[in-house]
Amino acid sequence: MSSEQHELLHRPRYSIREVVPLTEVPYTTLCRWGRGKDALLAIPDGRNQWSFANVVEARVLNALRERERVPTLRRMIDFLQDRFDEERPLISERLKTSGSAILFDDDGTLVDVIDPRGQIVIRKAFEDALRSIAYENGLASSIWLDPRRSLIRVDPRYRFGEPFLEGTSVPLFTLSKRHRQGESFAELAKDYDLKTAKVREAVKVYDALPRQKRNAA
């Protein structure tokens, strides 16, 4: 990993409130995952801000959390780190799924990730979480927030890591705010030389993302 890639992945940049819509994980669950001796995620030391790597990790964990409790998830992460010598396995392109098992690429061989203390149950949401991630040099580089991977993208190299409209540099926050203030989708599309349908769909997807919630998972 180059120093530039390390900086992009691990630099503190998001408050927990900002992480909620990027991961669709409740606020208090994120707090639990990132704090205390049993924390699941390695949040940058001494900071209340999360890195892009933390966002990706939380999205992957979120796909498993309804079926698996924190101790099982903790064991899974420990197992991947120990077995495959991968410090941050949840952001690695080596992490894969066949739809029925979690797999890890071990020098070209796909190995079943079998933890003798408890097997993880695979759900479609886990497959979707992995598909939403784009990789460079074997590590997560950006994510899509829409199922079709064509509208809303988050990339720490652009817009300071804010969600933006794919294929442009237009932040979704700006489009959403202007629409809430009364501008039509057609007016917004004209301003940015975009198709009205694309702007409409992107804003609707963005506005439907959960915001800060303090209910526990």
Image: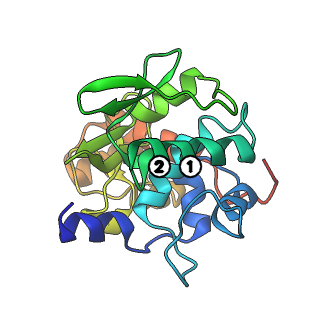
Q: Quadrant of residue 106?
A: top left
Judge whether residue 207 can be spotted in this image.
no
Residue 166 horizontal/vertical position (percent): 27, 44
Q: Residue furthest right?
A: 215
Q: Residue at x 52, y 20 (%)?
A: 101
Q: Nearer the viewer, residue 96 or 52?
A: 96
The numbered mark at residue 70 is: none
Q: Residue at x 31, y 55 (%)?
A: 155
The numbered mark at residue 78 is: 1
Instruction: Tell me how far mark 1 sits from mark 2, CA to CA.
Output: 5 Å
Judge whether residue 101 can be spotted in this image.
yes
Q: Quadrant of residue 108?
A: top left
On screen, residue 146 versus residue 6, left or right, reads: right
Residue 59 horizontal/vertical position (percent): 53, 45
On screen, residue 52 versus residue 101, left or right, reads: left
Q: Which amino acid type is shown beneath numbered disc 1?
A: Asp
Mark 2 surroundings: few (<14), some (14-19) or many (≥20) residues within 10 A = some
Query: Does residue 77 sit above or below 14 in this rendering?
Result: above
Quadrant for the N terminus in the image: bottom left
Q: Which amino acid type is shown beneath numbered disc 2?
A: Gln
The numbered mark at residue 81 is: 2
Residue 144 horizontal/vertical position (percent): 38, 41
Q: Nearer the viewer, residue 170 or 103?
A: 103
Q: Which type of secondary structure does the marked residue at label 2 adopt?
A: helix
Q: Nearer the viewer, residue 202 or 29?
A: 29
Mark 1 surroundings: few (<14), some (14-19) or many (≥20) residues within 10 A = some
Residue 147 horizontal/vertical position (percent): 44, 30
